[in-house]
Amino acid sequence: MNINLELYKTFYYVVKNESISRASNELSISQPAVSKAIKNLEEQLNTNLFIRKRDGMELTEAGSVLYKKIKDAMELISSAENDLKVITSMETGILNIGASKTILHEFLMPYIKDFHIKYPNINIRIFTNKTSDLITKAKMGIIDVIFTNMPFEIPNNFSSSKMMVLHDCFVANNSYEYLKNKKMKKEELQELPLLILTKGTITRIRLDEYCQENGLEIHPQMEFGSNTLIKEFTLAGFGIGMLTEEHIKKELENKELFKLNLDLPLKEKYLGMIWNKDNKSLVAENFIKYVKDNIAK
């Protein structure tokens, strides 16, 4: 199909703005022109992309499938355009960072703040998702650098840098005071009301491997998609949380939480920074160097 890219662009902005009128304003073209572009696109694709309703427009199944791909394409085009602006200058540009909310909050924010102070005209965009999804976007050039728990299998054309070793531990609030200073056996892990990450995350994979190797069968009280939620629910006394010690220093020092005396010899985990070597963004190169130079300070 030889479809004008402008039609796809119009479709993208209509979906993004959830409105023809708002898309019209952002694109600086008339509403009839937007409606005509959508109609032309549907005719050329020979399928309906929207269900027209009295209170607005809703994507059809075909429209949803198309938007997912068009969204990535538009973000890639935008990224390419901005890369051209910063070939020789750090006066403007975009830095695209991928990380979990926990890593952003507990580790990355000071670096982002300082980098922003140094380069105030650089627009910083944050992507939070599973590591595998972030890597997919990095392959496409949408994300410049990713911060994630390692080890994690990365593509051959990616580089990585070890930031800091992380240590997982089990913690509780003072409602579990009877467990303080108690030397616990690994078998007791099966009886604890555990608050842990969902299956598929690096930390959960390491825990499941340990349990399998030691013949243990755990029954989590609750499972979460982020360590931030585990910390909140552990502080509230819902159970025993599995958290990264480096991310709960304040809570341990303030004695809001205490570590269980349970030896858990899991495989090494560390915070890593990874990036696509094919990405030639000057902004990304400077940020990666900045983090490396300041990590030990």
Image (cartoon, rainbow, N blue to C red):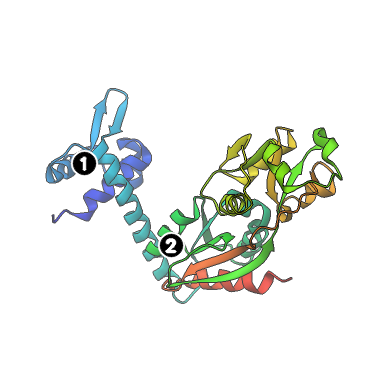
Location of the N terminus (image quadrant): bottom left
Asked whether residue 28 appears in the rendered view, the answer is: no
Q: Which residue is mark 1?
A: 38
Where residue 46 appears, as percent x and y from the top left, is: 12, 42
Q: Which residue is mark 2?
A: 138
Horizontal arrangement in the rendering, residue 112 relative to residue 191 (left or right): left
Check the image and report above or below for 115 versus 9.
Answer: below
Mark 1 touches mark 2? (CB < 8 Å): no
Give neighbour class at mark 1: few <14, some 14-19, many 20+ (Cα, 10 Å): many
Check the image and report above or below for 291 versus 7.
Answer: below
Check the image and report above or below for 155 versus 40.
Answer: below
Where residue 285 appears, as percent x and y from the top left, is: 52, 73
Task: Specify which label sits upstream in the sequence, 1 or 2.
Answer: 1
Residue 288, picture quadrant:
bottom right
Location of the C terminus (image quadrant): bottom right
Asked whether residue 157 appears in the rendered view, the answer is: yes
Identify which residue is drawn at 62% across, 43% down: 196
Between 201 and 80, the residue placed more toward the observer is 201
Residue 148, picture quadrant:
bottom right
Identify which residue is drawn at 64% across, 67% down: 163
Horizontal arrangement in the rendering, residue 4 relative to residue 61 (left or right): left
Residue extending furthest front?
A: 215
Where residue 239 appears, as percent x and y from the top left, is: 71, 35
Three-letter code, disc 2 = Ala
Where residue 181 appears, as percent x and y from the top left, is: 87, 45
